[in-house]
Image (cartoon, rainbow, N blue to C red):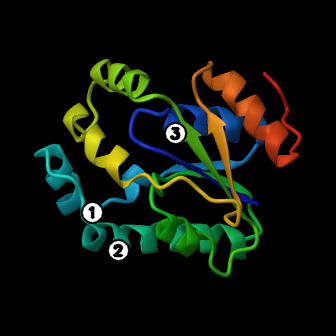
Amino acid sequence: MIVVLAGTSGIGKTTIGNVLATRLGWIFEDSDALHSPTQVAKMRSGQPLTDEDRWPWLATVAAWMDQRIAAGESAVVACSALKRSYREYLYRGRPAVRIVLLMADPETLAARLAGRRGHFFPARLLQSQLADLQMPDDAERTYVVLAVRSPAETADEIIRRLGLTGTGG
């Protein structure tokens, strides 16, 4: 199984993803590391990515997932996947994929981003991500999980919702 932790910047995808992967004994990848240097520079300068910017990055994320699936490995990947079309692309031909959309109110996200240091994504871009966010409908196989408790409690909720068995701790 590949679990994609989706959501805006500041939602805790990396932190929760590390906890989740550790509890499950799975591989973790932060798709921020899969952005091209050009994309990172664009965001660092305060410019939001466009769909044209995101599709090559999503293809890289999908290729990473395909490698794990081909190797028979379960994994967790943090990837914003804000739009329905992005999530549909990540699901396409990959029955092992489960997407969990992490949610919190804009004030919580802004506070988390304000306290974050050393990341290329500036807090001022949060509004562009919130504008791009499309909530899943009933036909989409995406789970929505509130990420307002501790990362460990959120990971526990994801494990429960996906019917997985974590090692605890």
Are there few (<14), some (14-19), or many (20+) residues within 10 Å of tag 2? some
Task: Decide which of 142, 66 is in the foreground and name it.
Answer: 142
Circle 3 or circle 1, nearest the eye = 3
Task: Decide which of 61, 27 is in the foreground and name it.
Answer: 61
Q: Which mark is residue 13?
A: 3
- x and y percent of residue 163 in the render? 88, 46
- x and y percent of residue 98 in the render? 70, 58
Instruction: Tell me the quarter of the picture where residue 149 sits.
Output: top right
- x and y percent of residue 132 in the render? 36, 54
Q: Amino acid at mark 1?
A: Ser
**CB atoms of marks 1 and 2 within 8 Å:** yes
> Which of the marked residues, 3 or 1, is nearer the chain's N terminus?
3
Q: Which mark is residue 36?
A: 1
SS category of the residue bearing label 1: loop
- In the rendered image, which quarter contains the N terminus? bottom right
> Which of the marked residues, 1 or 2, is nearer the chain's N terminus?
1
Left or right placement of residue 168 versus residue 27 in this view: right
Q: Residue at x 18, y 62 (%)?
A: 38
Q: How many marks?
A: 3
Left or right placement of residue 125 versus residue 16 in this view: left
Q: Which mark is residue 56?
A: 2
Are there few (<14), some (14-19), or many (20+) residues within 10 Å of tag 3? many
Left or right placement of residue 45 versus residue 134 in this view: left
- Vertically, is 53 above or below 49? below
Circle 1 or circle 2, nearest the eye = 2
Q: Amino acid at mark 2?
A: Pro
